[in-house]
Amino acid sequence: MRHGLPDSAFELPPRFQLVERRMSGQALDAWLAGGGGLVAGFDNHMILVDEPGGSQRIDRVGAAVTRQFGLCQGQMLQRTTGLAEELCAACDLIALHAAPVPFETSLVTVAAAIVLVRGVALPIDDGRFAQIVLNWREVLNRAATVRLRRELAMALREGRPVQAKIDPFQ
């Protein structure tokens, strides 16, 4: 009894179940639920790195990662800038302490876009491998955004015909 009220008046409400929507969070949850083993279901957005504390060689890589970033099976991770630097740093941390390493970075592409990358590196087989799950979004940088706005304004001033909006519910 506290302050003259029964203890039942101080019960905490039940925890609300939150559904993780981010791919890296889903991968981490699956890794935890699976006891720290290789996580299935992220093959397209995954990099499996052999010897994260040593050669850091890519053992497997998903097709989407290859298309977006040009990483290939058998390639060694290089300590350059941007994504490669984050991947190497995450592997180094896994080699020091076999625990998940979340990270975020951004890259500038040739097409005047910025790619925002979020990922998690997961230690596999007591840190002998690192499974890295990545997802990304591409956004326009300031110069490209200004150019797009200028082109839109010009198109509106020229009075180009606007196509009828199609109603998807008809």
Image: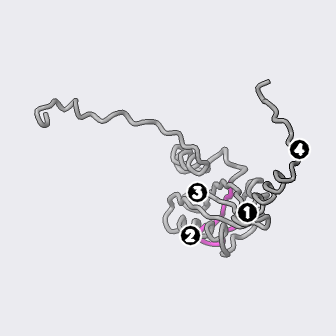
Q: How many marks?
A: 4
Q: Secondary structure at mark 2?
A: helix
Under mark 1, the amino acid is: Val
Q: What label does residue 30 carry, if any? A: none
Can you identify the residue that label 1 sits on? 146
Q: Which residue sits at x=59%, y=51%? A: 24
Quadrant of the image for the N terminus?
top left
Q: CA distance from mark 4 to mark 1?
A: 23 Å
Q: Identify which residue, 107 or 63, lies in the foreground.
A: 107
The residue identified by callout 2 is 92
Q: Secondary structure at mark 4?
A: loop
- How is the rendered protein coloured? one colour
Task: Write the residue at 77% across / 58% down.
Answer: 148
In space, the residues marked 3 and 4 are separated at their CA atoms by: 47 Å
| Viewer-side label of 3, 2 | 3
- Mark 3 or mark 2, earlier in chain: 2
Along the polypeptide, which appears first: circle 4 or circle 1? 1
At 67% from the left and 48% from the top, the residue drawn is 42
The image quarter in which residue 112 lies: bottom right
Give the distance between the C-alpha atoms of the residues marked 3 and 1, in whole angstroms: 33 Å
Q: Which residues are magenta?
A: 46-57
Tell me the residue that label 4 is attached to: 161
Magenta segment includes 75: no
Disc 3 and disc 4 in contact, CB within 8 angstroms: no
